Image (spheres, rainbow, N blue to C red):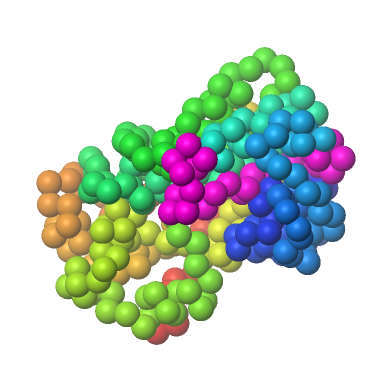
Amino acid sequence: MTETVAVTGGNGRVGRSVLAHLNEEGYRTVDLSRGKREEERADVYLTTDLLEAGEVYGSLAKSHADAVVHLGMIPTPDETPGHRTYESNVMSSYHVLEAAGALGIDTVTLASSFSAIGGGFEPETVTVDYLPVDEDHRLTPSNPYGVGKQTLEVAADGFARRTDDRPRTITSLRFPWVVDDDLARETFVEADRTLAGMRESAHFHTQRNTLFTYVHASDAVDLVRRTVEADFDGHERVWVSAPDTSAETSSREIAAEVFPDVEIRGSLEAHEYAPLVDTAKAEELFDWDPEWSWRRLS
């Protein structure tokens, strides 16, 4: 039974929310982050350079963790050279997986990203074969951030194939943009979220390249906790999304206007604003049903 969860990157915005939720659910938490402490939620704080294998091993050993949630990566590629961004995604994940396996920690959750598909920060338009996208959709990233996220998933596949010295349960969560109430109000409610309005926005390329996807922190941390409690054997990739898009135009119209040559599959008709990312696997594996929509703020 999981009692202690080590959270890397607990100083970050999402990390702080994860620590708070896990504490509220009764878990002992340990924050492994670089630099000085910037949160007050973890039971223990261990200063850790996640790019140093020895520090990761030592901190996880000292934490006595039963599970690891690895969020401690560069969150965007805007302010770092490409090789640093890639290194942050890939090598920190490798060190966490390697140390967890050696220490007998059975459960690891990795922060992958929407960018693994080849969207997000890509300068070109995202490649979409069908909507909504699911875990079988091909991945076509080219920038260091997206390639790094795809690579950490491939590394997790490799660890899952090991006979010994491996985490038993590994989940890669493909997060979109994670919002709180204030961010959602500023970004969605106070802006023109019709397709015509978004086309006029300076951020339309990014919105299109993330398939108008987002998730609220409350649903994101709930899913993280469920992955910590999971007990399947192997590595699973899982898409994450709110129960709707960030648009005030129907999903069918967005698909027809923005992705006119893309195959449309049945689940896009679930409701008017159905997400363009299929979260059925998260529901199947973790009984996760996202509830929070920005429309409740309208």
Vertical position of residue 104 compared to residue 199: above or below: above
Instruction: Give the quadrant of the N terminus.
Output: top right
Residue under the point 49% across and 28% down: 154
Q: Residue furthest top?
A: 163
When asked about the image quadrant of residue 105, the answer is top right
Vertical position of residue 248 compared to residue 177: above or below: below
Q: Nearer the viewer, residue 276 or 143?
A: 143
Q: Nearer the viewer, residue 272 or 78?
A: 78
Query: Whole-percent x and y of residue 115?
Result: 40, 46
Q: Can I make out residue 201 in this image?
A: yes
Left/right of residue 11 with respect to residue 262 in the rendered view: right
**Chain part drawn in magenta:** 59-86
Q: Nearer the viewer, residue 18 or 79?
A: 79
Instruction: Give the quadrant of the C terminus.
Output: bottom left
In this figure, what is the number of numbered marks?
A: 0
Query: Whole-percent x and y of residue 131?
Result: 26, 48
- The answer to if 173 sits in the magenta stretch is no
Vertical position of residue 145 compared to residue 235: above or below: below
Residue under the point 61% across and 23% down: 159
Residue under the point 53% across and 71% down: 180
Q: Can I make out residue 167 in this image?
A: no
- The answer to if 84 sits in the magenta stretch is yes
Residue under the point 67% across and 31% down: 95
Query: Whole-percent x and y of residue 290?
Result: 50, 61
